[in-house]
Amino acid sequence: MKKSIVFLFVILPLSVFCQGKYTVSAGVGFPNLPRLTSVLFKNNNGYSSKGNGPYHIKVENRLNEWFGLGININYMDYQVSYVGEALDANGIKVPNNILVKSHNTALNIRANFHLLNNVENEKWDLYIGTGLGYKFGKFKVSSDYTEYTPTITLPSISPIGLEFTIGARYFVIPNLGIYAEIGPAKSFIQFGLSCRF
């Protein structure tokens, strides 16, 4: 929670310089979609799961009243731990602590199609956004007894990053506001702060 709060407020210092053509947004999303796969391990002893994000950073250049182009960076991580079994040097069954860790980042080119004219509507901005790019990350499994580390194979996932959201921004003051989006982008719901400059 603390990381999420810090993340949301990194944009605040930018508000001093904001004026209008570009929009920078920073937010957090729910749920952490890749972390949902951790339920596969839920029946194991000592199961626990935690994760961060997804976190979203967006920069958009509003090219005209109806269209904007920019870049999105989406990041998330999670880890799962549970206790399996192993045989020690004497052939006796002993607990084997297993740790599954993953992190993933997507860099997408983003196009926003705006539904309101920003000249006539200074406070509200409604838009449909779609993104295409590249995603990369790491997946690692480790355990106390290396020879008893389980082999976990994830479904083959394309390195192509995709997102499609419907969103709204509301500017409380001319240069600083809030935003919310729904749609697949490492999460189904996201919200945060937006700054125009």
Image (tube, helix red, strand yellow):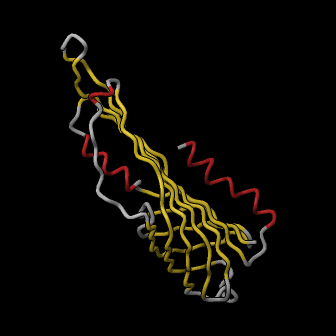
Q: Dividing the picture into quarters, in which one does residue 157 lie?
A: bottom left
Q: Relative to 40, does residue 131 appear above or below in the rendering?
A: below
Q: Quadrant of the C terminus?
A: bottom right
Residue 170 appears left or right of 51: right
Q: Dividing the picture into quarters, in which one does residue 179 lie?
A: bottom right
Q: Looking at the image, which residue sits at the far right?
A: 17
Image coords of residue 189 (percent x, y) = 44, 63
Q: Name the foreground residue: 41 vs 3.
A: 41
Image coords of residue 46 (percent x, y) = 28, 29
Q: Relative to 168, does residue 51 appear above or below in the rendering?
A: above
Residue 26 appears left or right of 31: right
Q: Name the foreground residue: 3 vs 116.
A: 3
Q: Name the foreground residue: 118 vs 156.
A: 156
Image coords of residue 148 (percent x, y) = 26, 28
Q: Relative to 146, does residue 63 appear above or below in the rendering?
A: below
Residue pictured at 27% horizontal, 40% vertical: 151
Q: Name the foreground residue: 70 vs 157.
A: 157
Image coords of residue 158 (percent x, y) = 38, 64
Residue pictured at 56% horizontal, 48% vertical: 4
